[in-house]
Amino acid sequence: MTPYETAGTPRPTGWRHVLTPAAGLWLLAAALTAEFGQVPVTGLPLPGGLDRAERAGLVGVAALLAWAAIGAAAAATTRLVEWACLRPDWGRAGSFVLIRRQDRWRAADDLAEDARNAARAAGDESPQHRLFHEAMARRNAIALLPPVNPGWMADRVTALQQRVTGQYGLDLPSAWPRLWLLLPASVRDDVIRARAGWDDAMLWAAWGLWFGLLGFAWWPLLPPAAVVLLWSHRRARVSLDTLAHLVESVVDVHGADLARKLGLPVDDGVLDPRTGRLIGIITRKGA
């Protein structure tokens, strides 16, 4: 379980989860592809000796089952999409991408440090402070810390864990389920909404892939599939960044509460790295 899992909030299941408008739209697109696409598709084989009502009933049942099947397939594909987005290793191609990201980050970091020094030398009211914050924003858009993964999303997960560990000595994956139990309902709702935004982005990316498959047989479906994929990628980045900030904020605000609940001393209400490491010893239980 990643730190982004919201304990106690199972993923939606059931007929309403698979019989979605997107699944129905995909079936319509599949029918149009069968009619106008480059791949010949035979009609639905029906047994002989049926009257019109029986044939209509069988076609309706088949359509309902196909609707549910494609909805379930898209839901299952979201797990594959999530795995691909958060995968830390892309093989040989990933090494090239990672080197490029590291070079860009170092260049942006040098500019940010130059801007920081100029702002310090210029005084508090200088416009250099605005330039410094803009330079920091450009660097952080690449990664909050020096990149260690080829993909931005995997790096965002890594940066969250590194920042929490570096500040508090806390092992976030093992501590997060315990922290979740201490959170007020309003905070849980904020985290759940952010997690739902990430899940929705993964689902839309899955649908983009499924419509793209049809596009290889009927090209007019390729442009909308590409638009869905690009939009879902942008939404996934925003949702993941929001979720990561929320999780880090939970540790900032409630990390000391977790230490107290586990019987550990907390000085001045602040979680120090030594106590954070002790929390990890308790929560990992030797694992």
Image (spheres, rainbow, N blue to C red):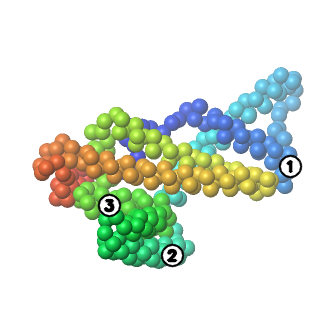
Q: With respect to residue 66, does 81 lie above or below? A: below
Q: Which residue is mark 3?
A: 163
User: Who's the residue at 36% across and 58% down the image?
Assistant: 160
Kindly report the distance in space between the C-alpha atoms of the residues bearing marks 1 and 2: 43 Å
User: Who's the residue at 40% across and 37% down the image?
Assistant: 189
x and y percentages locating residue 116 in the rendered image: 35, 71
**Of helix, strand and loop, which one carries label 1?**
helix
Q: Amino acid at mark 2?
A: Arg
Which sits in the foreground, 282 or 196?
196
Circle nearer the viewer, 1 or 2:
2
In the rendered image, the residue lying farthest to the front is 125
Asked if the residue under mark 2 is in contact with the one under mark 1, i.e. CB atoms within 8 Å, the reply is: no
Disc assigned to residue 36:
1
Q: Quadrant location of residue 27?
A: top right
Q: Which residue is mark 2?
A: 100
Asked if the residue under mark 1 is in contact with the one under mark 3, i.e. CB atoms within 8 Å, the reply is: no
- The earlier-in-sequence mark between 3 and 1 is 1
